[in-house]
Amino acid sequence: AFSELVIEQGATFNTTLNVQDTVGLAINLYAYTAESQMRKSYYSSSSSNITSTITGTANGEITLFMTAANTASLTAGRYVYDVLLTNNNSTTRVVEGMALVREGVTR
């Protein structure tokens, strides 16, 4: 699935994603772990981790989170990101997209 994120520089970022199968049913995330990173481009060697927590096992709910200190350290601009789910040594990309970091004024 493709999803765009907007992250405000210097503010806490928190959003919830609902992962579904090809017919629109929630994926049961029991025994899965989630991880996510964002980079300036697909080829960038440096990355920023996005804390990814499965918050609704039965309804396919994943929460993405960054502290205000984490977002303050980001350079404003466009990034790419994805969310990976792992279960029994099998990893699947379930969400990917663009993340826009909007520059903050208050510091």
Image (cartoon, rainbow, N blue to C red):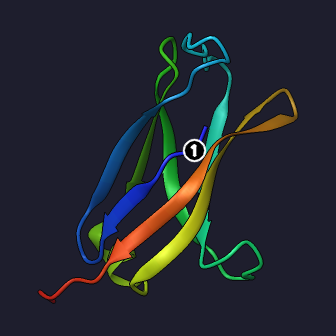
Q: Is residue 102 above or below residue 87?
A: below
Q: Which residue is at the far right?
A: 89
- Residue drawn at 81 percent across, 38 percent down: 91
Q: Is residue 14 above or below residue 24?
A: below
Q: Is residue 4 above or below residue 40?
A: above
Residue 93 position in % (x across, y down): 73, 42
Camera-nearest residue between 31 and 8 = 8
How many numbered discs, if any? 1
Q: Is residue 76 above or below residue 87?
A: below
- Residue drawn at 67 percent across, 76 percent down: 41
**Residue 21, quarter of picture:** top right
| Residue 1 in the figure: left or right of residue 100 | right
* Disc 1 element: loop
Packing grade of label 1 (10 A; few <14, some 14-19, many >=20) is few
| Residue 82 in the figure: left or right of residue 52 | right
- Residue drawn at 49 percent across, 53 percent down: 51
| Residue 31 in the figure: left or right of residue 67 | right
Residue that badge 1 annotates: 2
**Residue 7, quarter of picture:** bottom left
Residue 38 position in % (x across, y down): 58, 66
| Residue 68 in the figure: left or right of residue 44 | left
Check disc 1 and give the amino acid type: Phe
Q: Quadrant of the C terminus?
A: bottom left
Q: Which residue is at the far left?
A: 106
Q: Quadrant of the N terminus?
A: top right
**Residue 37, quarter of picture:** bottom right
- Residue drawn at 23 percent across, 69 percent down: 11
